[in-house]
Image: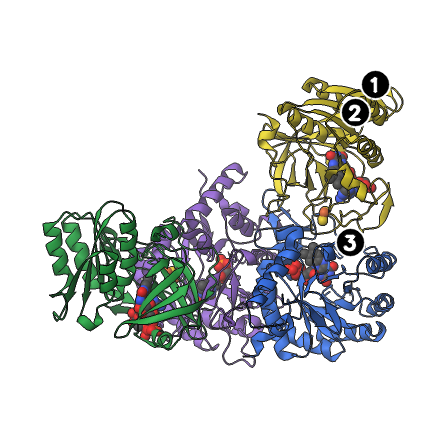
Chain colours: A yellow, B green, C purple, D blue
Amino acid sequence: MGCCNSGCGDKNIHHDINTEPRAFVIDRMWDEAENIKTFVFKGTLHSKPGQFCMLWLPEFDEKPFSIARDYDGEIWLTICKVGPATTQLFKMKPGDRVGLRGSFGNGFSTVANKKVVLVGGGYGTAPLHFTGKCHQDSGSDVTMIIGARSKNLLIWEKKSEETGFRTLIATNDGSAGVEGFTTHILEKLLHEEKIDLVQTCGPEKMMKAIAEMCMKKNIPCEVSVERYMKCGFGICGQCVVETGEKMCQTGPVVSAERAMTFSDFGVFHRGAEGQRKDW
Amino acid sequence: MGCCNSGCGDKNIHHDINTEPRAFVIDRMWDEAENIKTFVFKGTLHSKPGQFCMLWLPEFDEKPFSIARDYDGEIWLTICKVGPATTQLFKMKPGDRVGLRGSFGNGFSTVANKKVVLVGGGYGTAPLHFTGKCHQDSGSDVTMIIGARSKNLLIWEKKSEETGFRTLIATNDGSAGVEGFTTHILEKLLHEEKIDLVQTCGPEKMMKAIAEMCMKKNIPCEVSVERYMKCGFGICGQCVVETGEKMCQTGPVVSAERAMTFSDFGVFHRGAEGQRKDW
Amino acid sequence: MKNLNVAFCGVDFENPLVLASGVLGVTAASLAHVIELGAGGITTKSMWRDPHPGHPNPTMFGTKEYFMNAVGLSDAGLVKGVQTMKELRERTSAPIIANIVAGKVEDFGAIAESIGELKPDVVEVNISCPNVESEFGKPFACSRVDAANVTKLVRDNVGNIPISVKLSPNVESIVDIAQSVVDAGANAITAINTVGPGMRWNIDLRTPILSNKVGGVSGPAIFPIAVKSVYDIHKALPNTPIIATGGVNSGRDALEIMMAGGTLVGVGTAIYYHGDATWKKFTDEMSAWLEQSEFDNLSDIIGLFHKK
Amino acid sequence: MKNLNVAFCGVDFENPLVLASGVLGVTAASLAHVIELGAGGITTKSMWRDPHPGHPNPTMFGTKEYFMNAVGLSDAGLVKGVQTMKELRERTSAPIIANIVAGKVEDFGAIAESIGELKPDVVEVNISCPNVESEFGKPFACSRVDAANVTKLVRDNVGNIPISVKLSPNVESIVDIAQSVVDAGANAITAINTVGPGMRWNIDLRTPILSNKVGGVSGPAIFPIAVKSVYDIHKALPNTPIIATGGVNSGRDALEIMMAGGTLVGVGTAIYYHGDATWKKFTDEMSAWLEQSEFDNLSDIIGLFHKK
Ligand SMILES: Cc1cc2nc3c(=O)[nH]c(=O)nc-3n(C[C@H](O)[C@H](O)[C@H](O)COP(=O)(O)OP(=O)(O)OC[C@H]3O[C@@H](n4cnc5c(N)ncnc54)[C@H](O)[C@@H]3O)c2cc1C
Ligand SMILES: Cc1cc2nc3c(=O)[nH]c(=O)nc-3n(C[C@H](O)[C@H](O)[C@H](O)COP(=O)(O)OP(=O)(O)OC[C@H]3O[C@@H](n4cnc5c(N)ncnc54)[C@H](O)[C@@H]3O)c2cc1C
Ligand SMILES: Cc1cc2nc3c(=O)[nH]c(=O)nc-3n(C[C@H](O)[C@H](O)[C@H](O)COP(=O)(O)O)c2cc1C
Ligand SMILES: Cc1cc2nc3c(=O)[nH]c(=O)nc-3n(C[C@H](O)[C@H](O)[C@H](O)COP(=O)(O)O)c2cc1C
Ligand code: FES
Ligand code: FES
């Protein structure tokens, strides 16, 4: 089944009216890289690429994660261990139950018969892969640029190749692909080829550089702006950027133009009590 | 506009999920006969013929009435003054406001290109007229038999003629039409002509006689079984017949066959506290 | 197929769903029909000794979210009550819960005795009616003393029939009241009656929608309050079975409130949303869930939330 | 076109709809955006003097019928509060209602003083938080004495800013509490805070959905309780303006609760159901109704139900 059959819905419906978490069983899981694992659940969240869900570890905590796949009866989440909740999750085993709610938020556009470049950093590559799959199913040509500090932190590059995306790698230390940043690869590409759309998900400073680059060249670009999220559906106000827009509904995916109106974009985000934290 | 465009809906949806009364203004009213008036409200209840609504006189009471017309932007109710609520209503004037909710209940079937006989007694003639209009719009041939004790209690006979129904009258005292009962006229008709459907609304003993007559002759027949109603939407249990079926939802209109399974049909009904009252 | 039966105060119910008091309860025919549709048992509407007129219409209405009623506990009195109960016994073999009410503490004895003679399976005592003699007209259910006194009187007069006292959630502590009625001899608790009262008006007619101005809130809106009440009561009184009632609107809701501590599950307003299909829909959902679960018997889930 | 403006304690509001406390209230940007979307004013989330961690997630969820939350009044404390208030003043000229909270009676003085210095248009006092020092940890809003003492302290320390005390419906008599806070110096009443608490579980995970186990119920489910509370308070205290809050989910709802006695109308959970469109949708509906009515000013309808 093509990914978009199960996924792409109405852009304006950001959440079901019932946001009780539903139980899902961890079907399997595997390491992607050091401290990065992919978890698979049977079922669907009826999501489109770029949307996220809230993953609940009962009696522990609940956190937002981008959906890395939602088709063929499976939901994939690719998760980086960074703190208490993700550490707890990494201790779980197939057969264990968690709660999921969503999908929430605005996803990436899917385009047909175009030339698309995706730029992923960190776990951002995973939801971009889902996006690329949708483009591909619609006849678009997909280039995936994947960045990491070094080879052992690279993820999804094999899947990218297997899926038939042109796959380009950048590592800071040159341990895989070209030495340097994804932005260098992108810059070259944009210079040499006619690209219709750039979509990126990764560290915010990287996304900001890409947004600026694309705007200068007048190439449509979408970025995924992640903010602290409590509810995921537009009530708590935790995820607003400096324009007052909620990233759980207007975002996480917004156009580069819109992102550049957020004075906090690439500059700071906020913690659980709303306190400012520089990126 | 044909009546059925605004009216006939899904048989299984008996009420909106919101049953708060809505305000309607009395547009006009007129006498139909001694103690019988028709009240007109602007708007629609999206009803089909044979359904009823709850008419609320604020700070007084709320009672069920059959819908005598619901098309061309008007709702008509033809009402007999019999007690406190109807007496209160008869004191109201155009411009006064009441509450309406509904439509509720199961209505009469509407058939196309058939020969239909309608038998009305008392205010029952009014909703039957609505029914006849729907049949006519669907190409059916309509005969309306109207009964009353005497000429001054006859209603809707002129409208019936004007609408183009073959109109036959019976009065107990012979002051109009033939002397005797509607059942006599019906019996003769059924003997002489091939009738596809008989529908009746009026005194229950009359309806029972008609139901028995039609069943004997194997002619499809529908009757309107009115019971004391509080809610109109299947919760209070006030309107159940002896099989336990609720006349506000399964009825008021049921087939003759089904009505004959109600051991109370034509025998008794119940008051506000559920106490038995013989017809 | 695993079956859904449960035992409540020694009475067997084919499934735990019982019709809540006051809904579809006017005649024996109506109540028996609800059993035919798939209820495990039925509760009569609140029966008075003497005829009790209700409020004029409108007495109830519903929205997507909630239902309101102020029927005023209309009833034709004991003569009809006795007749209804007898007829009901002839029409069905399913368990009958007879709900009784009175306006003064001492009147509960007489109605309990008369109804007790008819041997319903359970007597449910509605103490949410305002005590006409108390200083502020507060329901018996709001006072530990009144609630206990009513319970004692019913217990002493009803014979050896199990009694369940039906509590109101509109109190400072429903657990305190539960404790005091159990101490006074209640065998079980029914929780909860309607929430509020609330009030709604029509802004064009500038009139309260209910003729009584205010009315009790029921339906899905009150489910979280019902779950909490049942949970708290079961926690405090783990050996007292509960007829868990309030806003149950699906089979999953029924399972949830059983896990919170309900042995039986009262279903009233759901009928507004699901009609005659309510019973089969809910029991089908419960059966499907039970099949895929680790439990052999539905009764194993009663109070499950307290067992971890 | 007739306009929707109302005056509340001497403060002009372009329309009576104000964002309820705790919803979208984390930053000044968020609050200012709500004004841009069409709110007549905003209420900050409850501000503490010291940083106050909230509960872990899940802290809220919604259904068709109701919403539940147990955020735990998380707040970064006064430093951030002061900054938010200042930034908010720069971003908008619409009226600001600053909501304050504390865990002990005597702590209300300090926060009132600090916030008062920032000159919000109104200070709203959230007394629905459990009093950490009271014997049973009951909210201040449940005790006439506590409620009055908090009010006095705030009144004495806040300067000449009007104060509105926010009441809980989960009390024996909300009117008694309203009376006592008004006697103690409250200029207005905000009614109501969430109903309950209620409790919901996930039956497959066998865990309460909210990490706090229980949470307050808001949204359409509680509207009848809110209308009744506002009606009763306005009846008892016709000269005390009310920020009528609780389950308002349409322009018609707003009109109804104003007729019951609200001067302003708090809107929180409606945003769950209507999103950013909430404000315009509701004010459009109110304008349309006002146009066809006999009233020239929206303020003429305040308390209308009491005038017949
Ligand atoms: C829309 C969105 C999509 C995301 N997708 C992914 C993904 O696909 N894979 C992945 O590994 N991570 C993703 N994250 C980040 C993920 O939510 C955090 O890594 C996680 O919450 C950390 O929780 P913790 O308890 O392990 O760590 P903590 O120690 O609590 O936090 C570590 C850091 O994670 C971030 N974080 C913590 N809580 C939240 C929160 N509630 N909302 C947002 N950020 C938070 C903060 O930057 C914090 O400094 C996403 C975040 C958002 C907003
Ligand atoms: C489905 C249905 C359709 C009806 N359609 C019409 C109609 O089109 N025109 C019309 O004039 N009347 C109609 N009636 C009857 C009408 O409801 C009663 O005449 C009215 O309720 C009398 O109220 P009252 O206060 O004036 O008289 P009351 O003195 O209260 O009652 C007089 C008699 O009316 C009947 N009645 C009273 N209350 C109710 C009630 N709540 N439900 C049913 N019957 C009641 C009883 O037989 C009673 O003995 C209909 C009734 C039903 C159930
Ligand atoms: C129309 C109606 C009438 C009711 N009448 C009674 C009654 O007579 N006695 C009683 O104890 N409870 C009565 N109740 C309360 C219900 O039995 C039940 O406790 C309450 O409605 C909550 O359950 P629900 O949400 O499933 O309806 C009535 C409720 C409704 C909706
Ligand atoms: C998510 C959420 C957070 C809330 N936080 C606060 C708060 O911090 N302080 C407060 O006084 N009320 C708080 N409330 C209560 C609301 O202000 C309001 O009184 C209540 O929700 C009823 O209104 P509604 O139905 O319009 O939401 C909160 C409500 C919600 C839903
Ligand atoms: S996460 Fe709550 S508003 Fe966006
Ligand atoms: S009128 Fe209430 S159930 Fe039919």
How far apart are the alpha carbons under marks 3 and 2?
A: 35 Å
Binning the other alpha carbons within 10 Å of mark 2 as few (below 14), some (14 to 19) or many (20 upward) gives many
Quadrant of residue D183 within the rendered picture = bottom right
Name the spot of residue D79 as percent of width and height, x first: 88, 58
Q: Residue at x 78, y 24 (%)?
A: A145
Asked which secondary structure carries label 1, the reply is loop
Name the spot of residue A28 as percent of width and height, x first: 66, 28
Residue type at numbered disc 1? Gly
Name the spot of residue C1 as percent of width and height, x first: 44, 37
Residue type at numbered disc 2? Ile
Position of C129 with respect to D298 (left or right) is left
Q: Foreground residue, A239 or B45?
A: B45
Whether pointer 1 and pointer 3 mark residues with C-beta atoms closer than 8 Å, the reply is: no
Position of D17 with respect to D110 (left or right) is left
Position of B116 with respect to A69 (left or right) is left
- Distance from mark 1 CB to nearest ligand 1 atom below 8 Å: no
Does residue D214 lie above or below C149 as drawn? above
Q: Residue at x 68, y 65 (%)?
A: D15
Whether pointer 1 and pointer 2 mark residues with C-beta atoms closer than 8 Å, the reply is: yes
In the picture of the structure, the residue carrying the numbered disc 1 is A177
Does residue A190 lie above or below C49 as drawn? above
- Distance from mark 2 CB to nearest ligand 1 atom below 8 Å: no
